[in-house]
Amino acid sequence: MSSIGYNVTRVQFKGNDRLTLGIVLGVLTFWLFAQSMMNIVPAIQQDINIPSASLNLAISLTSLLSGCFIVVAGALADKIGRVKMTYIGFILSIVGCLLIIFASNTVIFAAGRVVQGLSGACIMPATLALMKTYYEGRARQRALSFWSIGSWGGSGICSLFGGAVATSMGWKWIFIFSIICALVGMLLIHGTPESKVVEKGRHRFDYLGLCAFVVMLISLNLIITKGSTLGWKSQPMLILFAVFVVSAIVFGKESYFKRQNGFIDLSLFKNKPYAAATFSNFMLNAAAGTLLVASLYVQQIRGFTAFQSGMLTIGYLIAVLAMIRVGERLLQKIGAKKPMLLGSFMTGIGIALMALTFLSNTAYVVAVLLGYILFGLGLGFYATPSTDTAISNAPADKVGIASGIYKMASSLGGAFGVAISASVYTALLSSGGATAATIGLLVNVLFCLLSFIAVLIMVPRNAGK
């Protein structure tokens, strides 16, 4: 394989508030169709009549597809241009939303979720790469804070907003608003100079590694979401297990032997802060299953409406929006490690409070409100230090790929966290809704613990200073 040289094309342009807002809207349009779905499951089932197992798969499908292709999109953004890739993401977002709006059956609905996943794959690494390129020092940390508000805070905004819209206007209006966000974001980004990497020599893309990776993740997701429905020892499950094992072996061999030229550049993980930020980010995003389980439980078992369920998350929304800028300042003063540790710990405590399903209605509402506040505080402390740790440790010629892997961790963490949490909750419903919710939520506490351990062991004390 030929040697490759890189030259990062840049112009004398500094990121401004207009570009930042356009990028944030790009991230928000993803969350409008990704996170709002958590809060409108009953409404969708009544309207389209999708079976629970299929809907659980469709919900996780967007994050799964985003995670599968986000590294490819990041590498492609480096090659054809980060601004151009962001535009492609906006267009796919609009197409995906239109498919969801006009969906009349499971197939069209799932197709919309697939297109939306590809949209997220384009937007996330491209916008992070633009921030690395056009912002420096504290200006970059400030821009990343707003990006985190769109990414982490967007989940809270869209959960509350989605519940209110679904109750008062109908759930399809969520996706109409998502289209509006995409159009405004495109207008704001218009005029931004292109940023890309000029590649010298030919680089042969690892198509086999990509295909094996996609097959591996999809088969694993099907095992998780369909196992209890089809039966763990059924023929379809055994076939899926075999497909997963074979694809995992192929992907492992491709990644090992091709190393830097593989689908996932393993050399990036030699940097411990980057590796820790990426893994802990995966595990903390897996805790997104909390929002689905808590929403399903209060609506299906305690009789809350979608709006009431969304209102329970208001403390999360306020806390995460307020604390992200605090996390930025803590990063500048004491480094990244302590805010990341504190964030993982507080998020886990918040989820543990939501798992107290034996409480009476009033007491449980109080516990959930407090739990969501801690959940938001934790993510707010964690978001900017983690993102800055990953991006600042990425080589300039691989920032698109590195950003893609970091955001792949977010997407796949969310996809598998939701799939695992939903499967645990659904499988245990026969034992009682409270028991199912408690165990489903405690699984998410475990995710937070693993995130905490990764930061504790691998992130150096002076990271981010």
Image (cartoon, rainbow, N blue to C red):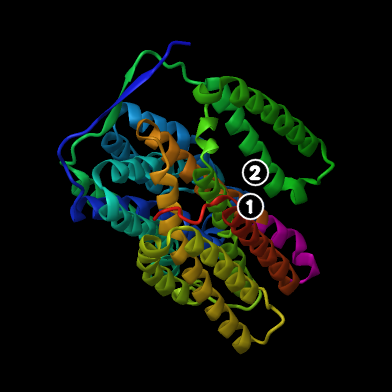
Judge from the rendering whether residue 24 lies leftward or rightward of residue 216; answer left or right: left
- The residues bearing labels 2 and 1 have C-alpha atoms spaced at a distance of 7 Å
**Could you say which quadrant of the image residue 168 lies in?**
bottom left
Instruction: Residue 425: say if magenta.
Output: yes
Question: Is 393 drawn above or below residue 445 in the view shown?
Answer: above
Q: Nearer the viewer, residue 265 or 149?
A: 265
Instruction: Residue 277: say if magenta.
Output: no
Indicate the position of residue 263 as horizontal and vertical percent values.
Answer: 52, 27
Mark 1 lies on residue: 419
The residue sitting at 51% across, 41% down in the picture is 67
Cβ–Cβ under 8 Å for marks 2 and 1: yes
Indicate the position of residue 314 as horizontal and vertical percent values.
Answer: 44, 75
Judge from the rendering whether residue 415 lies leftward or rightward of residue 335; answer left or right: right
Judge from the rendering whether residue 312 lies leftward or rightward of residue 420; answer left or right: left
**Could you say which quadrant of the image residue 75 lies in?**
top left
Type of the residue with mark 1: Ala
Tell me the magenta residue range: 421-432
Type of the residue with mark 2: Asn
Q: Could you tell me if residue 180 is visible in this image? A: no
Mark 2 lies on residue: 221
The residue sitting at 48% across, 73% down in the picture is 313
Indicate the position of residue 441 as horizontal and vertical percent values.
Answer: 66, 66
